[in-house]
Amino acid sequence: MIKKSILTISLIIVLSWAAGILIFAWKINHLPVSSDRKTDAIIALTGGRNRIAEAVSLLKQGLAERLFISGVDKDISLQNINNTQKLDIADYLHIDIGHNASNTFENAEETRQWVINHQIRSIRLVTSNYHVFRSLIEFEDQNPELEIIPHPVYSENIEKKWWTSWQTFSLIFKEYNKFLYAYLRSIF
């Protein structure tokens, strides 16, 4: 009887996890982009293709007064980023970079201090589509008073038919499990 109960519970957990990853994979490919809503600042998280370029473009469009790029390598300056990514940044005064974050939890920590220092009440969080949900959990947990508008960046290297590409499947598999960990950590 106990073995049957354990088997049943295990099966329910596995099926729930499988249904969850299917829902997660669908949702990350159907996230809306609120392109016209202004915020106090734009936050770009490093680590994914086109994130910084998208954030700079949003700043140039006037969707915020300031941009903070979190998770920049210690040896990299804003001028390096500008030159490497060919961003054509004309005004460095409204862009700050953070060198103290190496993961999403630390991005939220690093941004929290910057938000406090600049009296920011609302942000547009620019990150890859597959990274949006985990980022929101971390940022909302560390910045509960902050209004956060997610801004997903879609990469041409990430297949929408994720099950047809081992690279994309692997990425989504890992990100979904990281999301679950962050979610469970935030509720306990």
Image (cartoon, rainbow, N blue to C red):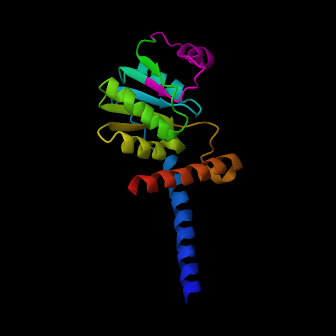
Along the line of sight, which residue is nearer the eye, 138 or 175?
138
**Where is residue 42, by image quadrant?**
top left
Against 40, residue 128 (above or below) is: below
Q: Is residue 73 left or right of residue 125?
A: right
Q: Residue 172's x, y, as percent? A: 59, 50
Which residue is pictured at 38% across the width and 27% down the height? Answer: 114
The stretch of residues the image draws in magenta is 68-91
Observer able to see residue 39: no
Q: Residue 19's x, y, as percent? A: 53, 64
Against 59, residue 174 (above or below) is: below
- Is residue 81 on the magenta stretch? yes
**Where is residue 117, by image quadrant?**
top left
Which residue is pictured at 58% across the width and 79% down the height? Answer: 7
Which residue is pictured at 65% across the width and 38% down the height? Answer: 157
Q: Is residue 150 left or right of residue 179?
A: left
Dividing the image into 4 quarters, which one contains the N terminus?
bottom right
Dividing the image into 4 quarters, which one contains the C terminus?
bottom left
Against 59, residue 139 (above or below) is: below
